Amino acid sequence: MIGGKFSDLHSNADRLQQIKTKSYVAIHSHHMQMDPVEFIDKISSKQHILQVITNQDKAKQVQFRFIRNGLLKKEHCTYMTHESPQKIKYEMVESGIDVERFVADSLLKIYKVPDIIKYPGGPLEGFKKMIAEIMAGTPPREELLEG
């Protein structure tokens, strides 16, 4: 093991779980009866959220509402997916996001990412290469897998 004994890692994991549980209970009890989309509309800028939604259609609806709300506030969004970017753009448009406008304004970037698990140098090197390309402003290339 790197960086400590198993017991240290175990106690840190317990503390993290306690924090997660307390945060979840606080948010959940405060917004227990609220629809997830309503909740998204009520959060302020620069906040991070975690919502667990088991209905895939509802999850996409909430996800795209969160993105739309941020874009309308001139916040930047980088959307990384294994799906077709055209499919994602279509779904965003169907959800009320003016994709062409936000892409033209450089607020929205949609990248199809390669499967870094299959990268010849290993997943960590594949991830580093993919992020470097994104930070340079270029979409990750499918050739990433070829090294």
Image (tube, rainbow, N blue to C red):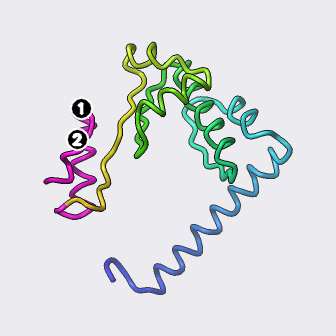
- Dot 1 amino acid type: Thr
Query: Horizontal and vertical percent for residue 86?
Result: 42, 30
- Residue 122 x, y percent position in the rendering: 22, 64
The residues colored magenta run: 120-147
Mark 2 lies on a secondary structure that is loop
User: Which residue is labeled 2 in the image?
Assistant: 141
Q: Farthest residue in the right direction? A: 33
Where on the picture, by quarter, is residue 48?
Answer: top right
Q: Secondary structure at mark 1?
A: loop
Name the residue: 72% across, 30% down.
Answer: 42
Q: Is residue 138 magenta?
A: yes
Q: Amino acid at mark 2?
A: Arg
Q: Residue 5 versus residue 127: which sits nearer the camera? A: 127
Disc ID at residue 104:
none
Tell me what residue is drawn at x 25 percent, y 46 percent. Answer: 130
Q: Are marks 2 and 1 in contact (CB under 8 Å)?
A: yes
Question: What residue does disc 1 label?
Answer: 138
Can you name the residue that lies furthest to the left here? 147
- Judged by depth in the image, the label closer to the viewer, 2 or 1, is 2
What residue do we see at 35% from left, 36% from top? 111
